[in-house]
Image (cartoon, grey):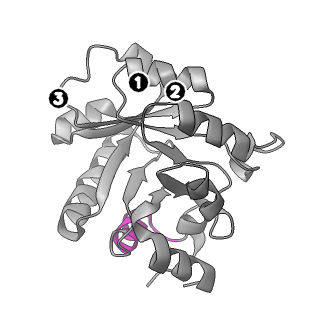
């Protein structure tokens, strides 16, 4: 494992969140989830936009088993129907999807929402979110050509959201601490967790 990632995990594993992406993933995504679950990080957000409903169900079922055994929190992404089918009570949704799902998420214990402004954060809380991701903080290949919103944006959201905020977007072992120092409860990393060699 690269030294900077190993050090970040050693120092702050409980405040790091891995976000999955099949297209970025080195090797099979199910195997990557299994390795991530052993690292002792805060959570894994199982994001897999490229998969069919059936593929996602199979992946989620495996991920649930792995994460329950390791004690790592697993949050399904964007697939509330799959979560219901599997009896899983942790979901993350884009804000528009959360709005569209208003009144249908009863029984979910953890509801995350993707937010890009203070007003988004306040709306997410009103709609029942239990945490939000604030993005994108730094420039990232996922949002090519779009400037990051920056640490000032993150600090403002953290101070006004009235919900736990997880920083997202362009975050790496080199800059995640700055996000925690600005009030984020956790820092989400996608690229590094998808591409780094893991034990």
Residue 174 located within the stretch drawn in magenta: no
Quick one: label 1 or label 3, which is nearer the N terminus?
Answer: 3
Residue visible at 38% across and 70% down in the picture? 31
Q: Crowding near pointer 3: few (<14 within 10 Å), some, many (20+)?
A: few
Q: CA distance from mark 1 to mark 3?
A: 16 Å
Give the residues drawn in magenta, as a range. 27-36
Q: Crowding near pointer 2: few (<14 within 10 Å), some, many (20+)?
A: many
Q: Position of residue 153 (x, y in %)?
A: 69, 37
Q: Position of residue 93 (x, y in %)?
A: 43, 32
Q: Position of residue 19 (x, y in %)?
A: 49, 54
Look at the numbered disc 3 and give the secondary structure of its residue.
loop
> Which circle marks residue 3 in the picture?
none
Residue visible at 57% across and 77% down in the picture? 5
Residue visible at 21% across and 39% down in the picture? 89
SS majority, magenta: helix
Residue 29 located within the stretch drawn in magenta: yes
Label 2, on which residue?
A: 121
Discs 2, 3 touching: Cβ within 8 Å: no
Is the residue 191 above or below the residue 140 in the image?
Answer: below
Residue situated in front as seen by the camera: 55 or 148: 148
Quick one: label 2 or label 3, which is nearer the N terminus?
Answer: 3
Discs 2, 1 touching: Cβ within 8 Å: yes
Residue visible at 20% across and 42% down in the picture? 88
Look at the numbered disc 2 and give the secondary structure of its residue.
helix
Q: Can I make out residue 197 in this image?
A: no
Discs 1, 3 touching: Cβ within 8 Å: no
Label 3, on which residue?
A: 107
Quadrant for the N terminus in the image: bottom right
Q: Quadrant of residue 37?
A: bottom left
Is the residue 49 above or below the residue 96 in the image?
Answer: below
Total number of numbered discs in the rendering: 3
Label 1, on which residue?
A: 125
């Amino acid at each position: 494992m690269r030294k900077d990632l190993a050090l970040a995990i050693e120092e702050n594993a409980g405040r790091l969140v891995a976000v999955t992406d099949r297209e970025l993933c080195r090797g099979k995504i199910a195997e990557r989830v299994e390795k991530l679950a052993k690292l002792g990080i805060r959570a894994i957000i199982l994001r897999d936009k490229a998969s069919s409903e059936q593929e996602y169900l199979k992946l989620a079922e495996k991920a649930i088993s792995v994460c329950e055994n390791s004690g790592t929190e697993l949050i399904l992404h964007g697939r509330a129907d799959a979560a219901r089918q599997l009896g899983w009570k942790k979901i993350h949704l884009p804000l528009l999807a959360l709005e569209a799902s208003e009144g249908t998420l009863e029984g979910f214990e953890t509801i995350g929402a993707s937010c890009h402004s203070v007003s988004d954060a306040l709306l997410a809380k009103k709609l029942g979110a239990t945490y939000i991701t604030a993005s994108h903080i730094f420039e990232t290949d996922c949002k090519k050509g779009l400037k990051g919103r920056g640490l000032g944006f993150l600090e403002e959201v953290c101070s006004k959201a009235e919900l736990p905020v997880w920083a997202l977007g362009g975050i790496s072992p080199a800059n995640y601490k700055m996000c925690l120092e600005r009030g984020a409860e956790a820092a989400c990393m996608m690229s590094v967790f998808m591409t780094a060699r893991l034990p």
